[in-house]
Amino acid sequence: MTLRMTMTMPAVPRIQLGSNGLEVSKIGLGCVGMSATYGPPKPEPEMIKLIHRAIDSGVTFFDTSDFYGPYTNEILLGKAFKGVRERVEVATKFGVRLKDDKLEIQGHPRYVREACEASLKRLDIDCIDLYYVHRIDIEVPIEVTMWELKKLVEEGKIKHIGLSEASASTIRRAHSVHPLTAVQTEWSLWSRDLEEQIVPTCRELGIGIVAYSPLGRGFLAAGPGFIQDLAESDFRKRFPRFKQQNLEQNKHIYNRICEMADRKGCTAAQLALAWVLQRGEDVCPIPGTTKIDNFDQNIGALMVSLTSADKAELESYATGDIVKGDRHAFMSQTWMNSETPPLPLWTSMEGSSAEALA
Ligand code: ATR
């Protein structure tokens, strides 16, 4: 597969995410793989070079979390943003942590504040542009978490609030406390479960949609071959879709995308990304990469135009009955199992929440 559509770098458009004035590049950069999750951490100078390359290309929306590393990814970004803070939009997340080697999801107001202050220090910035609840704590009413986030907005520590992997009803409840700017959920040719409820809810409420894993964690870009070469520490080894018996079926999806990419004169990665980019003006995919060549190739997706027939054909390659295996394994909480308890009457006043939950 060649690197077509990278000869001329496209201008990266800017979009409004949500209705509260957050402007970001139409395509962002997912940074987790630079420090964790996808194999060992990558060399810091190279990652800083990649981040600067992205900024110079017009990709200014960076996605991290305190959980990535944990912590080291935020520290890396903090170093990379020295001297260029004004040119970037920084999105980070809180709410998932390792405690005694177990994953814990935390939405308690006291934890929200501590996590935010720690992220600000690691990122070495005064204000986080977009602060997401990484996963929803099903023991804490979402309103209670949002009250604290709203206070952080009022104090100038965060500018915008987002939720990641939240159900439509959680989105509505959270939005009624303070307008959400973005909802982040997996969205790609082979992960489309959000389309029925999450996307229409976001559109009704004017909330932007940030699509993570738009390349199917690399599969839609590189095919089954790369799974065999993954480091033992790479989390993808545990993903159902990458288990051998499922790969046997799923590899046909990749092969068909490659055939169409050949016809269109682009790469499989560009085709898969173009499909997400063209879901709407309110959609911002954040493909992850640790390589400048792949980054350059990915922004070439902005130059791939897809007709309705192209899109329908692509979608037919990866319908629900064709894709084998769940999209998630570790941290298997997704929007589908993330309802929070109703707000008890005695906590119906903002500010009384932290004490009530203590
Ligand atoms: P996530 O949001 O979880 O990071 P993703 O964006 O769907 O997932 O895919 C990220 C993976 O795609 C990474 O493993 C990345 O590998 P590199 O760091 O080696 O680039 C891979 N990837 C990204 N762009 C690619 C491209 N153009 N060709 C091949 N692999 C690519």
Image (tube, helix red, strand yellow):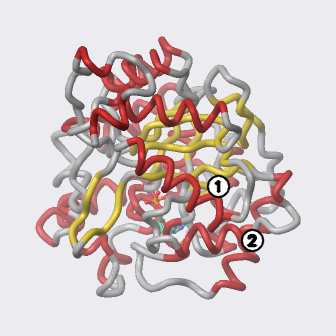
Vertically, is 234 above or below 219? below
The quadrant of the rendering that contains the N terminus is bottom right
Does the image show residue 89? yes
Residue that numbered label 1 is attached to: 62
Which of the two discs, 2 and 1, labels the residue nearer the N terminus? 1
Q: How many marks?
A: 2
Q: Is residue 117 left or right of residue 292?
A: left
Q: Amino acid at mark 2?
A: Ala
Q: Secondary structure at mark 1?
A: strand
Q: Foreground: 103 or 310?
A: 103
The residue drawn where x is 64% and y is 55% is: 62
Q: Secondary structure at mark 2?
A: helix
Where's residue 82, x and y in %? 82, 68
Vertically, is 264 above or below 180? below
The quadrant of the rendering that contains the C terminus is top left
Where's residue 76, x and y in %? 64, 74
Vertically, is 43 above or below 333? below
Q: Foreground: 280 or 136?
A: 136
Q: Foreground: 104 or 244?
A: 104
Say whether mark 2 is within 8 Å of ligand 1.
no
Q: How far apart in space, not on screen, are marks 2 and 1 (Cα)?
A: 11 Å
Q: Foreground: 313 or 76?
A: 76
Q: Quadrant of residue 17?
A: top right
Residue that numbered label 2 is attached to: 80
Does the image show residue 267? no
Where's residue 336, x and y in %? 22, 35
The residue drawn where x is 51% and y is 83% is: 41
Vertically, is 69 above or below 335? below
Where's residue 153, x and y in %? 63, 34
